[in-house]
Image (cartoon, rainbow, N blue to C red):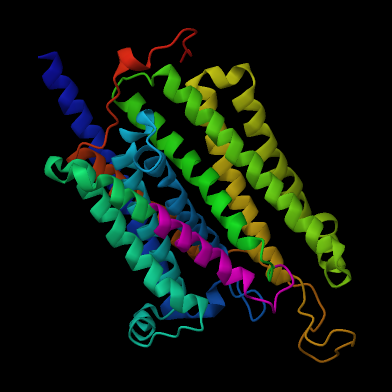
Amino acid sequence: MSSSLTSRNEAGIFYVLAAIGGLVTAVGLGSALYMEHAGHVVTGMNNQIVWGIPHVFAIFLIVAASGVLNVASIGSVFGRVIYKSRAPLSGLLSIAMLAGGLAVIMLDLGRADRIIVAATHFNPTSVFGWNVILYPGMFAIVAVYIWTMMERRMNAYSKPAGFAAFIWRILLTTGTGSIFAFLVARQAYGSALLAPMFIIMSFAWGLAVFVVVQAAMYFWNGMRLPPLVLQRMKNLLGLFVAATLYFTAVLHLTNAYFAKQTAFEYFLLFDSEFSALFWVGQVLIGSIVPMILIWSTTGQRMTWVTVAALLVIFGAFVQLYVFIIGGQAFPLDIFPGYDVKSSFFDGQVDHYTASLPEILLGLGGIGIAFTAITIGVRVLRFMPQDDVQHLETAGAITD
């Protein structure tokens, strides 16, 4: 009787979660239709700031989708046993988040049907053209990778498939970072550091998402994460967060070294609406506080590790907002060494306030990922199965 009640409660929770995800997705789609019908005027964007809050959501989902697959790569490619049981869940998260991110980008373009033109008229000289190949390829490779892990007769091909997924996701994140790295017209971008920086950011953000989803699944099923697994994953998360902070510091120091970038760096870090977001939201709350939680005594508890992962995700959104919106708000230096005067607000800092439809569209992408993950976990066996006796160690980590 008790097991029957438990299964009914689990089914009820599943339907509630699926309904919430479906509702958020539907609201996001409705917002996209409203913006397409009403036009650009109902958004907070303008002729200078052409990438708004939907791109912040989309880039986070795409970059984290690549990074979350790192869990599977550590298990399949590098042979770490405790990560192998988490590889299928890692693949599911990757596909779901990539679908959500790409949906937001396509719907934010205003003419989503124009993707047919990009797919049928490949431009090899465009970074966007490269991504038309990289994104569908990611779906296909990860799908095959999950198949080799979950189908017993295909297990022999799991390692080659995992290696292919590892290489492809590095290429995909490099392509995403290169969109900005090759955009020399904006002073905030145009740096070769952005490609490797996006790769390490994907490691941190993807692992943070995995930690949160894994904690929710274990809580939902009334299970306890083995101490060794928590120890390894939280230390790895702290390392990735520290590396992301290091790359951020190197990027800004590099820009500040060049005279042409000094004005922009001063604007972004000390004299704009983005300065507080950078120092408090990105550096303090999104990086330093999570590292303290992870590497102090609080890091011995699953609850605090999950809080640290949530703060990393929050810091990721702040970082992308500062990077994408702040980089566009600073005026373009079209003619270096000359003063440009016209009636078109030349040389003036622009401002951006996200409209409600933009925010709802971004949340719709998260809704797509959330719904796909909820259904996938319910239908197939994505719950990590650990050999608890094998993983038990002295000085167990408490919940």
What residue is at 61 percent from the left and 69 percent from the top?
Answer: 180
386 vs 68, left or right, is left
The reply to whether residue 162 is in sight is yes
What percent of the width, then of the height, locates residue 82?
37, 28
What percent of the width, then of the height, locates residue 202?
52, 50
What residue is at 37 percent from the left and 33 percent from the top?
Answer: 83
319 vs 225, left or right, is right
Residue range in magenta is 166-188
Name the residue nearer the viewer: 140 or 98.
140
What percent of the width, then of the height, locates residue 385?
27, 27
Question: Can you say which quadrant of the picture contains the N terminus?
Answer: top left
What residue is at 62 percent from the left and 16 percent from the top?
Answer: 297
Q: Quadrant of residue 32?
A: bottom left
| Secondary structure, magenta segment, majority class | helix
123 vs 315, left or right, is left
Q: Quadrant of residue 150?
A: top left
